[in-house]
Amino acid sequence: MLSPAEPDEVLFDIAERFGPGLTRRHVLRGAALAGVGLVGAGLAACGTRLYPALGTPRLSASPSASATASALASASAAASATATASAAASAQASATAIPTQSPPAGWTEMDVAARQGVRRYIGNLAPALRGIYGDAAFTKLAGILGAAENYAELSAKPAFAQVPQLLLNDVVAPLTPTAIGGVKEFRLTIDEIEHSIDELKPKVAAVGFNGQWPGPTMRVNQGDRVRATFTNNLHESTGVHFHGVEFDDFFSDGVPFVTQLPIRPGETYTYEFVARNAGSLMYHSHHNATDQVGRGLLGAFLVEPTAGSPAHDREYVWISNDALGGFTINGHGWPAVLPVLAAVGETVLIRFMNEGVMMHPWHSHGYSMRVVARDGIPLGNAAFSCDTLGVNPGERWDALITVDRPGIWAFHCHILPHVEGMQGMFGMVNTLIVVPQKAHVDAIVAAITR
């Protein structure tokens, strides 16, 4: 087995595969992004969150990088390095089509459809897997994907890179409060939106904060005084509840006709409180909530504890819902779910949040999770390890995963009708992608955010 390529070479190869025709696309309303655009400074400044210290990708070729890219291209027909613009366009149109090649003997339509979903998930990142995992693993993966068929998805961006993504939006355009007289002030809109569950399905009529579902993540420190002002652009009334916050003034609790009048269409309403308790909290509608939360009025409210969060290298906010669009993670279903990325030796903090109406037991393949907090409350000596963690509606669980072996590991709800059927995997399926070096993560993210 050849050793993985140098990270610089992998970065260059991934950049070449994505091609010069990709552009940054930005939402025209609020801070949300319609695509997944790259802002180098924002990425470099994101600290210990999902993708720390990425910087700007190097797009010029060094001799060694060029040699690696050339060797990779000749290693497999899957590389498709000379794919034309028309081939890339046809990939979008044919992503759900049954391949023209005859499937292996004994395969069913389910087998073909299931492989098609994984092909969409990997997209044109497939050739770069050789530089990350080495020849032997790459040969196996290429065989699993049927790369010798030179299928159309090898010229298309991964499904998860073709739709808005909460975690990338939070990095590229974080919701930053304004400091006014010792108060951290957030200003948000409540909007009617059209949302893509994945890159192929028709958009659904949804609602969201700042034009996105889930809404942008709000971050403060324990003890901060917070002011959150919401402007209702819906055609119906609403209200906003900060779920898990222990308010001093119960009139800040956000329940229409209990602690306030509803926010009518066109009105602006302000909540002000002290973030007394820390941890993984949420904000969401508490008015016609079955419909409004189910259609996207939800987001994460993270309060950094005075003592600091458990040590980690990366962070992944994982909000599940099970109403509009079926079974979703951060507003998307497989294969358009952004993977959890980590490098060997790193620890990832996953903040599970259930905004749906069903319990979901999250099962991690290959790794156990160290569960360290429930509903924002540290478990201390009661922390425990598991590989399947049930998260009830309204609950939040914080789990740490420390990775020591590379690979692509499935990570999904274990209520099987939520994840897999006669068309293969769907809904609440994700992966944990572990690569040998941090720079490999940076290379992948730099590519998908171009």
Image (spheres, rainbow, N blue to C red):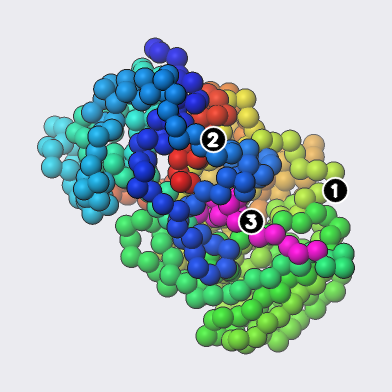
State the mark number for residue 183.
Answer: none
Disc 1: CA contacts within 10 A as few (<14), some (14-19) or many (>=20): few
Give the residue number, with chain letter if any, for mark 1.
306
Identify which residue is drawn at 61% across, 61% down: 216
Residue 28 percent across, percent down from the top left: 50, 68
Instruction: Name above or below for residue 69 compared with residue 262.
Output: above
Q: Amino acid at mark 3?
A: Pro
Q: Amino acid at mark 2?
A: Asp
Q: Which stretch appears magenta? A: 165-179
Mark 3 vs mark 1, CA separation in Å? 22 Å
Indicate whether residue 173 is drawn in magenta.
yes
Residue 430 percent across, percent down from the top left: 46, 44
Which quadrant is home to the N terminus?
top left
Mark 2 vs mark 3, CA separation in Å? 19 Å
Give the residue number, with chain letter if any, for mark 3.
174
Q: Is label 2 in a helix, a strand or a loop?
A: helix
Instruction: Name above or below for residue 68 compared with residue 153.
Output: above
Mark 2 vs mark 1, CA separation in Å? 30 Å
Q: Is label 3 in a helix, a strand or a loop?
A: loop
Of the image marks 3 and 1, the number of the one nearer the N terminus? 3
Identify which residue is drawn at 40% across, 13% down: 2
Of the image marks 2 and 1, the number of the one nearer the N terminus? 1
Q: Is label 1 in a helix, a strand or a loop?
A: loop
Could one spot residue 82 in this view of the protein?
A: yes
Give the residue number, with chain letter if any, for mark 2.
442
Which circle, 2 or 1, is nearer the viewer?
2
- Residue 40 lies in what quarter of the image? top right
